[in-house]
């Protein structure tokens, strides 16, 4: 069965303290891995799509990387406005069905 | 600024009542998804449509939930009768037709069934 596991469940950082979030996956055939950001009371906001091992994508202070078993979301010099829940999801097989991890709740304090 | 819209944003109802949630996908997107988010289960796919035809509704309780796309600009999710365990946030998402395309989410409908 396809599965996505995110760690840690929660992460508290000081402003400027860089760190990484992990997303490990077990799927029959990965067709895409997605990172979303979700703020309280809002829908998930798309960040990145990665399709193959070795691929990297960057956006402002965020950088996503992909291997054959996991993905990392690196946050460089975070700011309080980066506080949110970060969700990882995969698509495998013949469907467009996104399978989500439980998310990592990130809190960045000044 | 193209985005998915959902109505209502909040709904409080009593057990046994019918609930209808509506979604307008991004113009030009022909794949529409319904998800449910709870603290316990996280985000779960309920159903999805391509070109208005249902492709997968295996995540949906068939006895009380129904999903339709009356036209390309409107998707509906109906619960009849509603139960307290249906309390959750329901999200609609849309995507272009190609496989593994990015899904864009709406703001959600927060449903509370008393």
Image (cartoon, coloured by chain):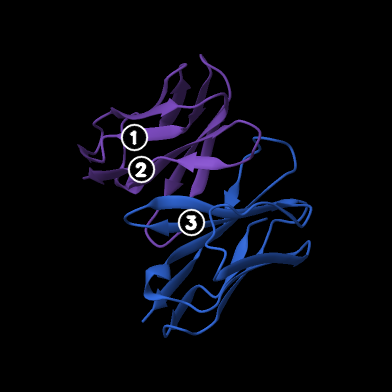
User: What residue is shown with label 2?
Assistant: A103
Check residue A6 in the rendering and tell me which mark sits there, or answer none.
1
The earlier-in-sequence mark between 1 and 2 is 1
Residue A57 point in image, percent of width and height:
52, 25
Q: Are marks 1 and 2 on the same chain?
A: yes
**A38 relative to B53 in the view: left or right:** left
Q: Are marks 1 and 2 in contact (CB under 8 Å)?
A: yes
Which chain is rendered purple in the image? Answer: A
Q: Residues within 10 Å of mark 2 (few under 14, many from 20)?
A: many
Check residue A25 in the rendering and tell me which mark sits there, or answer none.
none
Which chain is rendered blue in the image? Answer: B
Task: Give me the chain letter of mark 3.
Answer: A
Q: Residue at x 35, y 47 (%)?
A: A85
Real-space Cα separation, disc 1 to disc 3, in angstroms = 19 Å
Foreground: B42 or A49? B42
The earlier-in-sequence mark between 1 and 3 is 1
Asked if one can make out residue B112 in the rendered structure from this viewpoint, the answer is yes
**A68 relative to A6 in the view: left or right:** right
User: What residue is shown with label 3?
Assistant: A43
**B77 relative to B83 in the view: left or right:** right
Up-down: is A64 above or below A110? above
Tell me the element at label 2: loop
Q: Residues within 10 Å of mark 3 (few under 14, many from 20)?
A: many
Task: Give me the chain letter of mark 2.
Answer: A
């Amino acid at each position: 069965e396809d599965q996505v596991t995110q760690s840690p469940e929660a992460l508290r950082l000081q402003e400027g303290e860089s760190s990484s979030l992990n997303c490990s996956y077990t799927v029959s055939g990965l067709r895409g891995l997605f990172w979303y950001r979700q703020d309280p009371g809002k829908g998930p906001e798309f960040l990145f799509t990665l399709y193959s091992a070795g691929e990297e994508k960057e956006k402002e202070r965020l950088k996503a990387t992909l291997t054959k078993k996991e993905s990392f979301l690196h946050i460089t010099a975070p700011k309080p406005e980066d506080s949110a829940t970060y969700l990882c999801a995969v698509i495998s097989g013949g469907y467009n069905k996104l399978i989500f991890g439980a998310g990592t709740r990130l809190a960045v304090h000044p | 600024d193209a985005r998915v819209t959902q109505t209502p944003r909040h709904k409080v109802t009593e057990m046994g009542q019918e609930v209808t949630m509506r979604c307008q996908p991004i113009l030009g997107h022909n794949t529409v998804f319904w998800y449910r988010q709870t603290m316990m289960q996280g985000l779960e796919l309920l159903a999805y449509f391509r070109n208005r035809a249902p492709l997968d509704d295996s995540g949906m309780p068939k006895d009380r939930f129904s999903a339709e796309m009356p036209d390309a600009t409107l998707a509906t999710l109906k619960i009849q009768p509603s139960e307290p365990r249906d309390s959750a946030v329901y999200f609609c998402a849309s995507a272009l037709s190609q496989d593994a395309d990015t899904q864009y989410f709406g703001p959600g409908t927060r449903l509370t069934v008393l």
